[in-house]
Amino acid sequence: MSKKNSEYLINRKDNQYEVVIGLEVHAQVLSESKLFSASATKFGAEPNTQVSLVDAAFPGMLPVINEFCVKQAIKTGIGLNAKINKRSVFDRKNYFYADLPQGYQISQFKDPIVGEGKVILDMPNGQKEVGIERLHLEQDAGKSIHDLDPQNTFVDLNRSGVALMEIVSKPDLRSPDEVSAYIKKLRSIMRYLGTCDGNMQEGSLRADVNVSVRAKGSKEFGTRCEIKNVNSIKFMQMAIEYEANRQVDLIEEGKSIDQETRLFDTKKNETRSMRSKEDAHDYRYFPDPDLLPLEVSDEFINELKNDIPELPDDKKKRFIDEFKLSPYEATILVSDIDTAKYFEEVVAKMGKNKDMKLAVNWIIGELFAVLNNKNLEISQSPVSAKNLAILVNLIKNGTISGKIAKTVFELMLDGDKDPQKIVEEKGLKQQSDPKAIEALIDKIINDNREKAIEYKQGKEKLFGFFVGQAMKASGGKANPQLINEILKKKL
Amino acid sequence: MSDITKQSLTKLVENIKNKKLSSADVTKAFIERSEKSKELNSYITEDFALALDKAKKFDQKPNLDLKLPGIPMAVKDLFCTKDIKTTAGSKILNNFVPTYESTVTENIWKEGAILLGKLNCDEFAMGSSNETSFFGNVQNPIDKDLVPGGSSGGSASAVAGQLTPITIGTDTGGSIRQPASFTGTVGLKPTYGSCSRYGIVAFASSLDQAGPMAQNVKDCALLQEVISTYDPKDSTSIDFKRNQYSKELNNNIKGKKIGIPKEYRVDGMPKEIEDLWQKGIQYVKDCGAETIDISLPHTSYALPTYYIVAPAEASSNLARYDGVKYGFRANGENLIDMYEKTRSEGFGAEVQRRIMIGTYVLSSGYYDAYYLKAQRVRKLIKNDFDEAYKKVDAILTPSTPSSAFKIGEKTNDPVSMYLNDIFTVPVNLAGLPGISIPAGHDSKGYPLGLQIIGKAFDEQNILNIAYAMEEKIDFKNKITDWWIK
């Protein structure tokens, strides 16, 4: 596929439009306690059970920074190949809302903890670099619940004060597919680092999506609209598609685009205006006088650097170099930390005489199919890495055929059974005794003399018939390679 | 019994330790006097019955090793006190009972003191005359219808009127030192970061600091020793070596260099203040110290700077009083309507004025011209002091540009009210310690104070200077008990 063909463009009569997208991803910091208080952060707790006096903004309460969250943000910055700012400042973003108890959110405005960085996306037509503008730490707000009572709104402050990392990309993304790849890559990096669980259903990862369009080839950016708080990749893609087309339609009609904040209605699959630029909040940012500027030393950063595990890009390179995997296979296997862990465990358990290709095929093929069917994560796999390694080895050393292996695999799914035992108990061991196979084949040729003659006269297709008969006679256990060799000799 | 309330804290502690007085004797005496002094309106909340119970309990098993053994005291109603209503002088917190204790008051109770009640103050500590309190004016024990100063007006009135042997106030721009000066008492504003702000209703976070108020310097030193602790719950609390301020108190200040800043000689300052200052200079010289003329060139910018920084922080700090979680709530048609009605009815005029000023100076398009510029000027003001302290050990100035004024005299003129803080505000902006001691009387017989400003963390030094001067000045407060019928 040429690069040109893969371009995502919106076509109208004579005009082609390019879509420019930038994301502000809000990633919940994986931490037991909140950014400025000791309250727990467990998902799904009873409303208002994880709220301290600080989170509820009682008079005289003061924020104290959670060092662990700072470390998590710095680690994420390192994972994004970004500049770590040794001095950063917490600011107050002031606005009134019922689920914002302080009347301001503590965030970082002018001096974020992490500066410019980049991530590499693996797209079908090659790699693409996406710039990171910044990453900053901020507090989450609580939750307003409007549908429990006809008259009243309820407020749950469990989320209030939970640490978020806002990761702002440069406007480098050009299509819904790139957005998908970008989110998946960010998620992957943070899961490798253990800095965010990336769970979109639970709201641990959500994004504000900035979309603008421009005539293909134009260097100037169009007016952008920001679609707030989209919480799935699918919705992001749908929202972008709708929004880009809406903007193109406006331009085609000779109208102008208003810079505004919009909402994505997932039911109607459309974006709707939330507030215009004129109505935008004046957040009156200023440095939070309750907190000193955050200063971190080189030693502090270096210690964290030493703590960074192998990240997906490096792992992929190693898988290709060390295990001779194809880039495609490597990309799949490193995309999620749990998949990579599983694969590496299989590799380790296979021992010395291992068949890497076979192992990869079994993971990407059979195992993924089962996980997909059962809607399971690889961490919940019914077959452990150890037993899959044994199974692959059984194939590799000729104990069972690939076909029998599929039967064994089916049986392994129930309670992660040891394939060795299954093979023994069910008598599935491959017959590899040439004499026994020879005897078997002699009998078959004898029973099918006419077909044997036809074969000799040139009807080569009949070879398959004899293989099938031999397999059948052995109950599927005969070594197929031996059958082939002996048949060729005998016929 | 009647002379118990006239005793200094030091004397009361001594008498309790020597078992000449019980905690109950002392507590009863202050309660009785407080009961007779309702006209001063010093208290917002009285907790007398419980105080007496606690005193009796203390007497049953007295721990005389404590620094404040069984000493009753009332505190400014800006400190959150567990299970005792804490209002900050505002209608919006009229029904607020904290479930927690401020670090500063916690420190006091740990040393054996007993809470008498909560003292009146300007609403959210915004005022210089205690006239902005939702709970009404406070009378100055010096004279009828005289303001006690503010915002710690109830605290100053209660100490001067001997309703409490000592107290604590908070000082954001002069709120301890100015009322101390107006009532003939001693008030210390410690270095920013010396006393924890945890549990103190915030006004302007980068300026707020709790501090002791007392009849004399030694009592003040003892209380400072108790309240100043490093507190990890306040990120701006500073972990420095704190002195045993009362034990280390020393009146030998021979050879100390005292700076006299020429910029504090402001236009329109009454001659009485200038004379007082000159007398002060003579006192320190008499004590063997040397005075040196210095310059603090950015002094005239301090007040405008303060009136940008403090309201800016206040506008944000007071956003939490929205009727949603606690405190006063007015019913509204919807959320916004509820906010507007709650805050319009719950906050008084001065607080609303400052919220609006603060919101304005932080708003987009004005931020650079006001807030950012103010922060830069603040740095220059601090640099002025840093420069001065290369040459001197402390600085001597008047505490206020005038003596106490009449209730209502300045209520319609906020700027003239703000000018009261002209000598105290630079100290907060620079985060330095400052102490006001009574140094004389004006022609009306009203007390006047002098301020000694120290280097950061140098409380011991300014307490020592104040202690030495106090001896020379031999100030006698003229309390006539005019309010007791």
Image (tube, grey):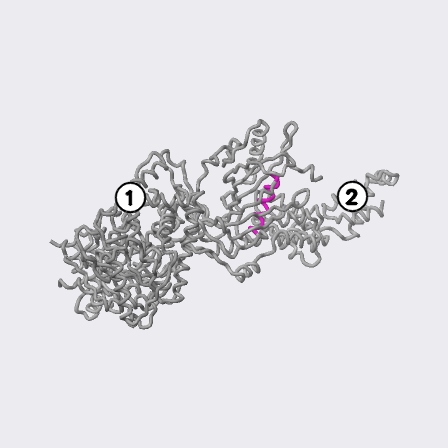
Which residue is denoted by mark 1 in the rendering?
Answer: B348
* Residue B184 position by quadrant: bottom left
Can residue A176 be found in the magenta stretch?
yes
Q: Chain of mark 2?
A: A
Specify the principal SS of the magenta part: helix
Q: Position of residue A280 (x, y in %)?
A: 46, 38
Q: Which residues are magenta?
A: A174-191
The residue at 58%/42% (across/down) is A171
Q: In the rendered image, which quarter contains the N terminus of chain A?
A: top right
- Classify 10 Å Cα crowding around label 2: few (below 14), some (14-19), many (20 and above): some
Q: Position of residue A315 (x, y in %)?
A: 64, 53
- Secondary structure of the residue carrying tag 1 is loop
Disc 1 or disc 2, which is closer to the eye? Answer: 1
The residue at 30%/43% (across/down) is B347
Query: What amino acid is at disc 2?
Result: Val
The residue at 45%/50% (across/down) is A91
Which residue is denoted by mark 2 in the rendering?
Answer: A467
Compared to residue B134, the image places residue B240 above or below, namely: below
Nearest the eye: B314 or A198: B314
Compared across the picture, whether B262 is left or right of A5 comes to: left
Nearest the eye: A55 or A355: A55
- Marks 1/2 in contact by CB < 8 Å: the verdict is no
